[in-house]
Image (spheres, rainbow, N blue to C red):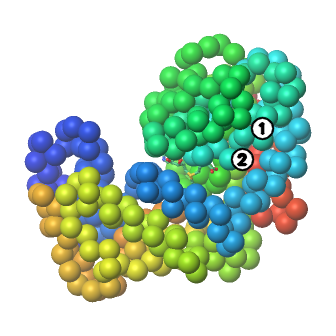
Amino acid sequence: MEQNVQEALSPTQVTGENGAFYLDVIQGLTKEFKTLPSKYFYDKQGDRLFQRIMACEDYYLTRCEAAIIRQQREQICAAIQNGEDSFDIIELGAGDGTKTVHLLDSLARQGKSFRYMPVDISGNILDELTGNLLAQNPELNIQPLEGEYFQMLDQAVSLSSLHKVVMFLGSNIGNMPPADALRFCTRIRQSIRPGDRVLIGFDLVKDPYLIRAAYSDQQGITKAFNLNLLQRINSELGADFDLDLFDHYCSYDPLTGACKSYLVSQRKHTVTFPNADIHFSEGECIWMEISQKYTLSQINQMAVDSGFEPVSTFTDSKGWFADVVWKAV
Ligand SMILES: C[S@@+](CC[C@H](N)C(=O)[O-])C[C@H]1O[C@@H](n2cnc3c(N)ncnc32)[C@H](O)[C@@H]1O
């Protein structure tokens, strides 16, 4: 049964630092099929857990993309530059930047003049990234931008008229359904000019067992990552989720390429917010995240449909992951 969101809110709760967070959470939990926005995963503890997920044996995505970038960095650097010697690199959802650093190193060694602008909603991970990069290369021209993707993209683009390279790595694009991913790419295209480039990491369709295993690791780190959002809601919004009452479930549908993570209520119970009660039945799920998988032809179609021309596709030796370069037309 859907609750009226406004009824669940007091005016003081929809304003202030956590107002948008509160509104998004209550909106998601009062839908007929409960959901929570995955962008809230990344507080300090969420950042730490995501770094542990990336190091997991089953989470092949980071290893595959790291191999692509390490082994094909010269070709990737050539594809993103469009022959320009000076340019801006804007990385959306940069995270800890452990893969990007190889590209930045190559460009610096080639004597290119570039400014690196990592964008992330998590100030914590941006501080870590900036500290690490400057420790390795104190000469790096870096301008971190903390905030939402498009607010920060527009700010970054307005800083100069140089050639732009927009990067979106780590299968971040998979954290939205395909129609939203298309809108996202179209929105990037609207912010940049013809000739500018994007570099996007897509996870590819493959053996469904491998995909499901990547999101259901045996050590329970993915489960802890999902439960951490409930913990964050408790501490920042004053709710009383009992984390022991939720288990983690992941499904993958080979026909649609959608891999979805859920938290499953283990029994009937009620979670209380300062101004709302959220009821759970036994077995009821909160949809936490989508990790969409693509074929190469779907990726090329998305490029064309969003106003780009595919330039290069870089895959790992197993063909599990692709980093693609598109040119804005
Ligand atoms: C899946 S991680 C990927 C990190 C990195 N790109 C990589 O490949 O390792 C997603 C990152 O995007 C950031 N993020 C998620 N939603 C965001 C949003 N709406 N605006 C800005 N950053 C966001 C998160 O804080 C997190 O650091």
Q: How far apart in space, not on screen, are marks 2 and 1 (Cα)?
A: 8 Å
Q: Is residue 25 left or right of residue 99?
A: left
Label 1 sits on a secondary structure element that is helix
Residue 227: x, y in percent?
Answer: 39, 68
- Residue 103 marker: 1
User: Residue 281 location in percent, x, y?
Assistant: 25, 82
Q: In terms of depth relative to the viewer, which is nearer, 26 or 107?
A: 107
Q: Is residue 270 above or below residue 49?
A: below
Res 119 quadrant in image: top right
Which image quarter is the N terminus in? bottom left
Residue at left offset 47%, top offset 73% = 223
Helix, strand or loop under label 2:
loop
Answer whether residue 307 is visible to the viewer in this image.
no
Query: Residue beneath label 2, please?
Result: 99
| Residue found at x 39% / y 64% | 228
* Residue drawn where x is 25% and y is 70% of the image: 241
Q: Position of residue 57 (x, y in %)?
A: 69, 72
Q: Can residue 324 be seen by looking at this rendering?
A: yes
Asked whether disc 2 touches disc 1, contact meaning CB atoms under 8 Å apart, the reply is yes
Marking on residue 209 = none
Label 1 Cα neighbours within 10 Å, binned few <14 / some 14-19 / many ≥20 = some
Label 1 is placed on what type of residue? Answer: Leu
The answer to which of 124 and 291 lies nearer the viewer is 124
Determine whether the beta carbon of the residue marked 1 sits less than 8 angstroms from the nearest atom of ligand 1. Answer: no
322 sits to left or right of 260: right
Quarter that holds the C terminus: top right
